Amino acid sequence: MSWKPNRESPIPVYKQIVQYLEQRISNGEYPPGTLLPSERLLSKELGVNRSTIVAAYEELRAFGIVESLQGKGTLVSKNIWGTSRKRSPNWEKLIETGSFLPNTTMMRAIRKENFDLDLIDLASGELSPDLSATQYFRKIMSNEDFNYQVGYDHSQGNLVLRETIASHLKKMKNIHATPSSVLITSGAQQALYLIVQCLLKPGDAVAIEDPSYCYSLSLFKSAGIRPYLLPVDDHGINPDDIVTLHKQHRIKMVFLNPNFQNPTGSFLDMERRKRVLEISSSYGIPIIEDDPYSLTTFDKTHMSTLKSMDQNGTVLYVSSLSKTVASGLRIGWIFGPQTVIERLADAKQQIDLGPSIIPEWIANQFLSSADFSTHMSKLRESLTFNRDKMVFSLYDQLEDQVEFLVPEGGIHIWCKVKADVNEQQLLKEAMKRGVAFVPGRVFGTEKGYARFTFGRAREEHIYEAISRFSGALRSLK
Ligand SMILES: Cc1ncc(COP(=O)(O)O)c(C=O)c1O
């Protein structure tokens, strides 16, 4: 909740809360029957005493606007509009029955609580604000040479940016692309969504890594796709597992995040890469290479992508600026066969009528300036510091209780927690102590893992964050 009572106002705080809730109820934001936040939660969110919320709810109850139900909490009154014949739509039912599935309860809890200012955030899978390219954006935006057309643009995204991305791919990743085979998307996430919606149909089988990037899991479920799992070890997946799955289920596509995989941080071994490509072309199974992390490599020998080795055009390449420049810029792209790109662009045009021109312009200015390489060197250096700090903190405070791979890039550490504790309780205890992480179960894996994002927290907070986690773990053993 972003609204807060105004402490300077002559209106008592509890009255302001009454007015605020009353307004949301009459706006239809809280329809009749809606369960209002508990007194404890609301007092925390608004930064007031619980007794202030009790007084506000009491007044709303006296007006007949809300009612209390034993064991349930405070609800917006069902007959709020008196005896009139008005009926409100059954929003709850509509919410439950839509075909696009909601996030898991655990993910929603983490995202909600994570806005708490005291929490050290090791959960959000993105860069901390000070590692993002904000200072360069300020410089770009203060220039007055913005010269793009501001109408609806090309359905594949702005041509100048596509040209810049094509040369970026060649220079940074040894991928040879032409602008007409590139589609600009709202992050890699939209790229994955378009691929799933346009190239697959309900009932199709795909192979995905286990564990795997959590938002792609619900994407498949919502589209009725059957995901089959390829276990990931320290060197990525075992390519021959694709063959086994294909023989059993006729795999239509393989989704891989081969470079500093989310969540494990693993880097797909070179021999395994060759074998993946061999299998892909001998069985005609396309590979979706989801690659937001390759440029974060701490050591340049880990730079290659599957796409740069793809000689038969079986790889559809997805990437974005989220993990290197800024997640809020929402610039991603797909590179692949032109017919596929045109099909996806057509769908994208129906969804959002094209990308937003201002982020495209900023991305183009930044990628084509010398500042990009300065930023990348600084970012790699800072991420290496953060990684080292987290590795040290884990060894120092939890040495015999966790096992993990030290990643050579990316922003996550995937930790096996040896003690047999309930993940949900561990998360709750950790949040109580002021640290957020993502429990392994969210990534569809067996229980007993935690993902810590070292790119998100400030380096000076990492030791304290692991100490809070360690306290939570001790409290449950
Ligand atoms: C492997 C992977 N793919 C895709 C995404 C989506 O990123 P974005 O849409 O911000 O580019 C993420 C984000 O965490 C990710 O880790």
Image (cartoon, helix red, strand yellow):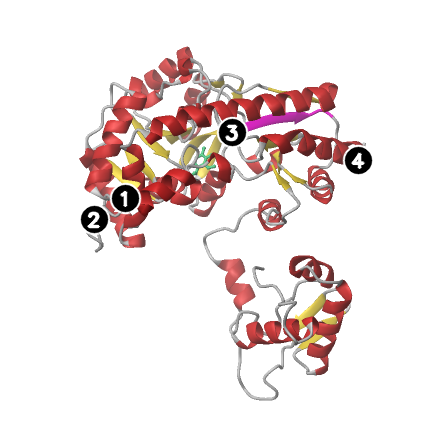
Q: Say if residue 231 shows up in the picture.
A: no
Label 3 is placed on what type of residue?
Ile
Q: Quadrant of ligand 1?
A: top left
Residue displayed at 41% across by 24% down: 377
Which label lies toward us, 1 or 4?
1
Residue at the spot of label 3: 411
Mark drawn on residue 361: 1
Residue at the spot of label 4: 476
Split into 4 quadrants, where in the image is the N terminus? Answer: bottom right
Q: Is the C-beta separation of discs 1 and 4 under 8 Å?
A: no
Q: If you read the primary sequence from the N terminus, does the residue marked by circle 2 or circle 4 appear first?
A: 2
Q: Is the C-beta separation of discs 3 and 4 under 8 Å?
A: no
Q: Label 2, secondary structure: give it.
A: loop
Label 4 is placed on what type of residue?
Leu
Split into 4 quadrants, where in the image is the C terminus? Answer: top right
Q: Is mark 4 within 8 Å of ligand 1?
A: no
97 vs 272, nearest the viewer = 272
456 vs 97, nearest the viewer = 456
Q: Is the C-beta separation of discs 2 and 1 under 8 Å?
A: yes
Label 1 is placed on what type of residue?
Trp
Label 2 is placed on what type of residue?
Tyr
Which label lies toward us, 3 or 2?
2
- Give the Cα separation between the discs numbered 2 and 4: 57 Å
Residue at the spot of label 2: 148
Graded by Cα atoms within 10 Å as few (under 14), some (14 to 19) or many (20 or more), the crowding at tag 4 reads: few
- Give the Cα separation between the discs numbered 3 and 4: 28 Å
Does 277 sit above or below residue 222?
A: above
Lateral position of residue 29 relative to residue 173, left or right: right
Main SS of residues in magenta: strand
Q: Say if residue 138 shows up in the picture.
A: yes
Q: Position of residue 109 (x, y in %)?
A: 62, 48
Does 115 sit above or below residue 420?
A: below
